Amino acid sequence: MFICRNGPRLIIKPKTDMQRNRFLKASLATATFLVSPFLWAADTLKKYRIDKGFKVDAGKDRFNQAISLFDGDTFMTKVSTKDTNGDLYIYKSRRVKEGGPALHVHFNQDELWYVLEGEFLIKVGEVIHPVKAGDTVFGPRNVPHCFAKVGPGEGRLLMTFQRVLSADQ
């Protein structure tokens, strides 16, 4: 850079475009260098997962806090979104009354039902699947679905959500 006096005014002009380009490149390199540890830390924290396996006993919830969303139903978390950084959520649903949730859509995750006991009707899109113990139904994201326990006795499902952001979705 050079300084040019023009009477009472001081004018600062870069010597060449090459120097300006060098200055900009050096500034960008410095900024990248200063920001990179923060980006690395954020990326590491974002991908955190537990690093040990675990066991959830039969009839128990992962955190010993079973949830009851509907009258006569119990949900027990087996694998939490906290365990998988939001990639997977598995829970066991015990239903004593007939019926189930209304038709709904999950925009961010797929859902899978595995029938452990009882009989259910599971609707995915326009298709209704009558299912019994041992049957599996897959529901892709963005497809309306619902399910209902039918018939007497207890019904139990093992349900899986894949790629969840939180268990509330």
Image (spheres, helix red, strand yellow):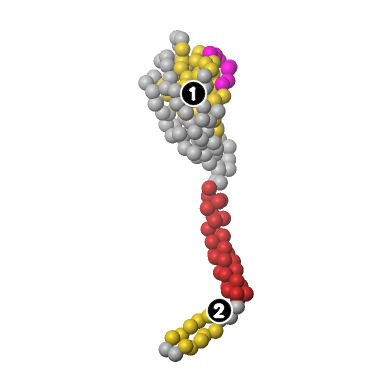
User: On screen, 19 above or below 97?
Assistant: below
Q: Is residue 135 magenta?
A: yes
Which residue matches tag 1? 145
User: On screen, 148 above or below 37?
Assistant: above
**Which of the 4 image quadrants contains residue 65?**
top left
**Magenta range:** 130-137
Q: Main SS of the magenta segment?
A: strand
Which residue matches tag 2? 14
x and y, in percent, of residue 87 in the image: 55, 37
Q: Residue at x 49, y 33 (%)?
A: 107
**Classed neighbour count for the residue bearing mark 1: other residues with Cα under 10 Å, few (<14), some (14–19), many (≥20):** many
x and y, in percent, of residue 35 in the image: 54, 61
Q: Is residue 94 magenta?
A: no
x and y, in percent, of residue 137 in the image: 56, 21
Q: Is residue 25 left or right of residue 9?
A: right
Q: Residue at x 53, y 41 (%)?
A: 85
- Name the kind of residue labelled 2 in the image: Pro
Q: Is residue 72 left or right of residue 146?
A: left
x and y, in percent, of residue 84 in the image: 54, 39
For numbered disc 2, what is the local secondary structure? loop
